[in-house]
């Protein structure tokens, strides 16, 4: 099993929460985070957890650089976080990157919230970011650099979808040339500005042993994105490699293939 961060996002027509998926599902995220999950050598996701949920006045953000299963507050926070858009993340840190608050997901800028699962090289990304936006970096992760690059393009274009469809092929081109590990880089993310979610999957090596991403339609109750299925339901659908999915609160979906 490849150790990777795990993403979870929910968008729904009415306020909901993700407590079931984090704590009660057949394969809940809190169990996935624990050492030994499915395989004795699994080291777990001990480097942090975080949740962001949107409100009438913006969003609420809670995160800690501790394992979700060791947190004294996570269960209560997740249970009481009701919203029509929720992003949740558990972190397995890239080697050498600190287990500190500023490196913990979600990352935010203005009204934007972002979670990432993957590994990139920070310097090639930041070479495309102006000093103005570099000043908004707080931590040392490749994930935050990735987010700030996307934000810089969104601000430049004035349109989220246009910025993503223009920027992601550039990042894929950079990723194609990277040698990070035997599994290569990944660009999996979920982004929201409070009206829609934008979820994307790309990994250099397209197989289901690493950097997976799935979605599940919950009838009229919501649209769920997860790094892996959280139960044995056959309703989970794997993202195609290079697929960007945009979903609004009425659960209208747009599926866009980014050139890979």
Image (cartoon, grey):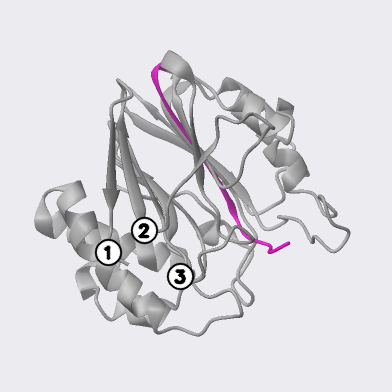
Query: Which percent across, then down, holds residue 103?
Result: 53, 61
Label annotation for residue 242: 2
The segment highlighted magenta reads 1-14
Q: Residue at x 60, y 57 (%)?
A: 208
| Label 2 secondary element | loop
Q: Residue at x 24, y 56 (%)?
A: 164
The answer to which quarter of the image holds residue 77 is top right
User: Which quarter shows the N terminus?
Assistant: bottom right
- Name the residue carrying label 1: 259
In the drawing, does residue 108 fall left or right of residue 105? left
Q: CA distance from mark 3 to mark 2?
A: 19 Å
- Residues 31 and 123: in front is 31
Asked if the residue at tag 1 contacts the one at tag 2, i.e. Cβ–Cβ closer than 8 Å, the answer is: yes
Q: Residue at x 61, y 61 (%)?
A: 210
Sooner in the amino-acid sequence: mark 2 or mark 1: 2
Q: Is residue 15 among what the camera can see? A: yes
| Label 3 secondary element | helix
| Label 1 secondary element | loop
The answer to which quarter of the image holds residue 3 is bottom right
Query: Which percent across, then down, holds residue 186?
Result: 47, 66
């Amino acid at each position: 099993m490849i150790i990777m961060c795990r993403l979870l996002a929910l968008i729904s027509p009415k306020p909901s929460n993700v407590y079931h998926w984090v704590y009660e599902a057949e394969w809940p995220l809190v169990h996935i985070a624990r050492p030994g999950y499915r395989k004795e050598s699994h080291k777990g996701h001990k480097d942090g957890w975080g949740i962001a949920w949107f409100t009438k006045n913006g969003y609420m953000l809670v995160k800690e650089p501790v394992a979700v299963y060791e947190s004294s507050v996570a269960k209560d926070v997740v249970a009481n976080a009701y919203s029509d858009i929720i992003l949740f993340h558990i972190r397995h840190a890239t080697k050498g990157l600190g287990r500190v608050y500023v490196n913990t997901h979600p990352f935010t800028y203005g009204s934007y919230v972002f979670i990432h699962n993957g590994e990139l090289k920070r310097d090639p990304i930041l070479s495309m970011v102006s000093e103005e936006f570099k000043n908004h970096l707080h931590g040392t992760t490749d994930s935050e650099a990735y987010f700030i690059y996307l934000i810089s393009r969104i601000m430049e274009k004035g349109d989220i979808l246009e910025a993503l469809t223009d920027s992601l092929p550039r990042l894929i081109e950079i990723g194609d040339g990277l040698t990070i590990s035997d599994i290569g880089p990944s660009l999996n993310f979920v982004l929201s500005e409070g009206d829609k979610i934008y979820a994307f999957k790309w990994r250099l090596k397209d197989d289901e042993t690493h950097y997976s991403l799935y979605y599940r339609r919950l009838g009229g109750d919501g649209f769920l994105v997860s790094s892996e299925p959280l139960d044995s339901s056959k309703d989970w659908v794997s993202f195609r490699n290079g697929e960007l999915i945009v979903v609004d609160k009425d659960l209208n979906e747009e599926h866009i293939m980014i050139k890979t």
